[in-house]
Image (cartoon, rainbow, N blue to C red):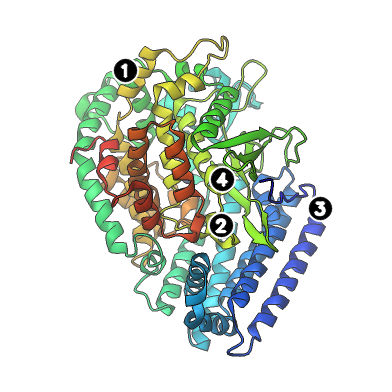
Amino acid sequence: MTDDGIIRTMNWTIKPSVIRTTTDQSIDTARKAMDLIAKTPPGNETLTTLQEFEEVFGAIREALGPIRFLKYVSTEKEQRDACDYTEKQLLKFANEILGRKDLFDVIIRLESKSETFGEEEQTLLKKTIDDFIHNGAGLPEAERKEFLEISNNLTVLEADFSKVLAEITTTVPCTKEELDGVPSAIYEHLEKDGDKYLLPLDYPVLIPVLNYAHNEETRKRMQTAQNQRGGKENSERLSDALALRDRKAKLAGFKNFAEFQISIKMAKTPERVLDFMDDLSKKLKPLYRKELVVLKELKAKTTGVALEDVEFHLWDLFYYHELLRKEKYSVDQNEVKEYFPMERVVNGVLEIFQTVLNLEFVEVKDRNVWYEDVQEYKVINKVTGNAMGVFYLDLYPREGKYKHYAVFDFLNRRVKDGKALLPITSMVANFQKPTDKQPSLLTHNEVETFFHEFGHLMHVVTNQASYASFGLDGIKPDFIEVPSMLLENWAWKEDVLQILSGHYKDPDKKLPSDLLERMLKAKLLDVGALTLRQVFFSLIDMYYHTEPVEDTTALWIKVFPEITGMNLPPDTYPEASFDHLMGGYEAGYYGYQWSKVYAEDVFTKFEQNGYFDEKTGLEYRQKILSPGGSRDPDEMIRDFLGRESNNKAYLKSLGIDN
Ligand SMILES: [Zn+2]
């Protein structure tokens, strides 16, 4: 068969003024189409009505999705600002439509007719109705209006919160002496002020400084600057958002926002999330107590301070963690990274998942990209020979670019007039840039991160759903990390690392087996401390969204040491730069650990059949990735595993005996 889908082309050089008019016009057209649907006389609504409704969203996402994405990657501030306008307008439009009573009335009438619908269409109807209810469309008029106003205010608060963080240009000035311990390749190319290097807070600089700077004051200054990023203004935005979310939940008839938000996720209730976290916390604390003794002893030995006087802070954690890895296991991440030049890692990962997922990745030479070093790949389904989608790799930091690691699915798959419009997506990462002297080198942590994000990419490009609403946005947020966390497991297999590694000075030199053996032994080093940090993020997010919070900063500073036993730098607003609370993960951070339970369980089947096994890989692709949001996650997992899921593999992955 050669019934290829359609690969849509995008215009990355679109002018700011055109962005604004395109946005307004697209929304205007979409609103008119919705007005027509709203006029459907009772009794005349059919499956086509639902499909037309869905298509309006599909079409507007197509028109504005790539523009919205540019907000996070464009090199020009004017363009980013215009795209910020697009993002806000698009989100407001979604709030407006999904909050409309007249449209809701038409769609809900389809419930009684849905028996004749196909399975995917039944799910689409259910999801659409849930979306309406979740946006207040079913409320009495006054409440409905208030709900909509709140949603719009939240949209602006959230977009502004993230924009402040993306635009930050703060630097921390440090002399060479103050950076003792940090590999010079990390900072020597940076701008200087006199004898001081100006250190930005981007991950490729921040992480090595926190990991290796012998000078505690340097680490503390970096950690402080990191925790001051959002400032009082973002802290206030968060407080305002929490109050609005609480009001919204109450209008919708829920006790609090956590209950409102989680009611439509896998976990279903906040109680289940809290039980999960409490249980995890109980299991991790004994591990952590032992780890902390060792870390404090190391700090005492290193600094010459008596053990009983040692204070252990957040800015010590990663430094002593790395030092311990080096002293106890003879694993130096800076030595390890010499075996993982970026090109090698990218090619290796592509090679592996071409096999495992039965795909072919074809590098596009004649690239259409938003920045010169971005790579583009076309994905072919090896089973049918058809194109499935396109992905981009945007790997290095630059000014104004999104500062974390994420995958953006700016064009979802959908079927229109019998033709598949293929999904297009990008990995947006911040790995260390190559310099004149050496290529971009990845620590093993970063290799793991690459696998993680690649898992998200594969989720997007292998999507086979017929409707755009079943793209990443339509997947339950506490399931969305399953494909990414699953792939991290490959980063720990010797034969995988054989393919992935090659010393940057001598590509034939693979990662030595004895080094890998020591890395594996150190895999669970400080797992208690590191996972408890994740528990903290999950819990503070739940606390913010269950009870009214007087002072978000004070609560964070109080709870952090209670859970992690570590102090934070003073005079900071740590919550003001925690994007997850303002970017779709609100009352949802727990989703990482929740997803990991399923990811580890899914991996057991690869452990049994072989993690290069094409049959298992194809089954995984077809049963878990391809449906996107069109199937119930519990059902998909059961179907793939052939049994109910359990947490045994998850606990084992954390070194906890059950
Ligand atoms: Zn992820």
Vertical comparison of 234 with 345: above or below: below
Q: Element type at marker 4? A: strand
Q: Element type at marker 1? A: helix
Amino acid, disc 4:
Val
Work out whether mark 2 precedes mark 4 in sequence or the reverse, and give the earlier one: 4
Q: Say left or right for 284 vs 545.
A: left
Are the two marked residues, 4 and 1, in contact with CB atoms closer than 8 angstroms? Answer: no
**Which residue is the site of mark 3?**
15
Quarter of the figure with residue 397: top right
- Per the rendering, the mark at residue 407 is 4
Work out whether mark 1 precedes mark 3 in sequence or the reverse, and give the earlier one: 3
Q: Real-space Cα distance between discs 1 and 3?
A: 54 Å
**Which residue is the site of mark 1?**
329
Q: Is the CB atom of the residue marked by disc 4 within 8 angstroms of ligand 1's nearest atom?
A: yes
**Which residue is the site of mark 2?**
465
Q: Real-space Cα distance between discs 1 and 2?
A: 47 Å
Amino acid, disc 3:
Lys
Residue closest to the eye, 259 or 162: 259
Label 2: few (<14), some or many (≥20) within 10 Å? many
Q: Say left or right for 285 vs 16.
A: left
Mark 4 vs mark 1, foreground winner is 4
Amino acid, disc 1:
Tyr
Label 3: few (<14), some or many (≥20) within 10 Å? few
Coordinates of residue 435 in the picture (x, y in percent): 65, 21
Mark 3 vs mark 2, foreground winner is 2
Amino acid, disc 2:
Ala
Residue drawn at x 33%, y 54% is 539
Q: Real-space Cα distance between discs 3 and 4?
A: 24 Å
Q: Residue furthest front?
A: 1
